[in-house]
Image (cartoon, helix red, strand yellow):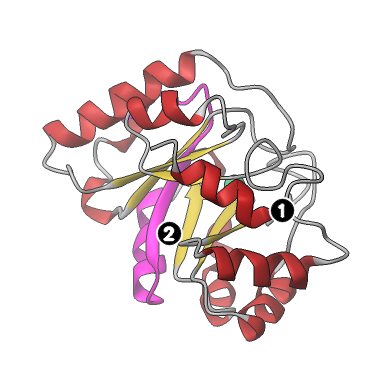
Amino acid sequence: MACADLLNIEDDILQLEEAGVEYLHIDIMDGMFVPNFCLNIDLMKAIKKRNKIPMECHLMVNDPERYVERIAEAGAECMSIHYEATPHVQRTLSLIHQNGMKAGVALNPSTPISVLDYLLDDLDVVTLMMINPGFAGQKLIPAMLKKLKDTRSFLDKNGKQNMDIIVDGNVSIENIPKMVDAGATVLVGGTSSIFRKGIPIADSVKLVRTLY
Ligand code: ZN
C-alpha cells in the first residue's frame, strides 16, 4: 500500500478489493531501521474499516516487539518483523502468535538464510527482500534470485514445503516469472507491477495473474 495513490488510497483499496487481491501489504517504517517513514497503525485501522482484504503488516522498525499488540488491535492477520531489527526474534514471533496473528520474518539482502535454522517452529512465512528496504523504485539485486532458490530448498528440506515465501522489492512484470520460478509464492506488487502510472489496477492485477 506504500505505492498506492496516498491522496486517493480509498479508491485504490476498492479497486484492489474488486480485483480480488489476497492481501494488503502494509509497510511500516520508523526512520531508524530504514531511513524513511511510511504507513502507520492509524492508517491500518482506517483501512480495516473500509474493506475486508486481510492485512499483512511488514515492520521495518527497530525493536518491533513494542508494537505487536497495537498491530493486532489494528486488525492485521499477519505481522512480519525483520531478523536484523531485534536481538529477540524468537520471543517476538511467539508474542505475535499469542496475539492471534501469523508470524513472519523478513531478511535484508545481506542476511544469510541460515539465521532461519532455529526459528522454523515459530514461523508461518518468510519475506525475502529483493532490494534494501526503505524506498520504492529500486532495482532487484541479482543475487537475490539465488537466495530465493536456496530458501525454497532449505524450507523443503526441513519439512516446510507449504511455507510461503514472500518476495518484496522490484516485483516487476519482468521479474515476476523469474521470482516465481525460483520459489516465490507471495508477490508484493508495487510501482513496477500493480501501481503503474496511468494503468488501471484491475488491468495490472490481471496481467500479473498470467505470469505465474
Ligand atoms: Zn514491504
Viewer-side label of 2, 1: 1
Q: Is residue 95 magenta?
A: yes
Pick the quarter of the image with the N terminus: bottom right
Image location of residue 209, percent across then percent down:
45, 46
The image quarter in which residue 135 lies: top right
* Front position in the image: 88 or 34: 34
Q: Residue at x 31, y 37 (%)?
A: 116
Disc 1: CA contacts within 10 A as few (<14), some (14-19) or many (>=20) = few
Q: Is residue 100 magenta?
A: yes
Question: In the image, 22: left or right of 58?
Answer: left
Q: Residue at x 24, y 46 (%)?
A: 120
Q: Residue at x 74, y 32 (%)?
A: 137
Of the numbered discs in the image, which one, if any, rests on residue 138? Answer: none
Question: In the image, 180: left or right of 38?
Answer: left
The image quarter in which residue 119 lies: top left
Write down the residue under mark 1: 200
Magenta residues, as a range? 89-114
Write down the residue under mark 2: 92
Image location of residue 42, percent across then percent down:
73, 76
Secondary structure beneath label 2: helix
Toward the right, the furthest residue is 7
State which tag comes first along the sequence, 2 or 1.
Answer: 2
Image location of residue 55, percent across then percent down:
53, 67
Question: Eyeballing the image, is 134 above or below 39?
Answer: above
User: Is the distance from the Cβ of mark 1 to the nearest ligand 1 atom less than 8 Å?
Assistant: no
Pick the quarter of the image with the C terminus: top left
* Front position in the image: 63 or 79: 79
Question: Eyeballing the image, is 72 above or below 191?
Answer: below
Image location of residue 46, percent across then percent down:
71, 80
Secondary structure beneath label 1: loop
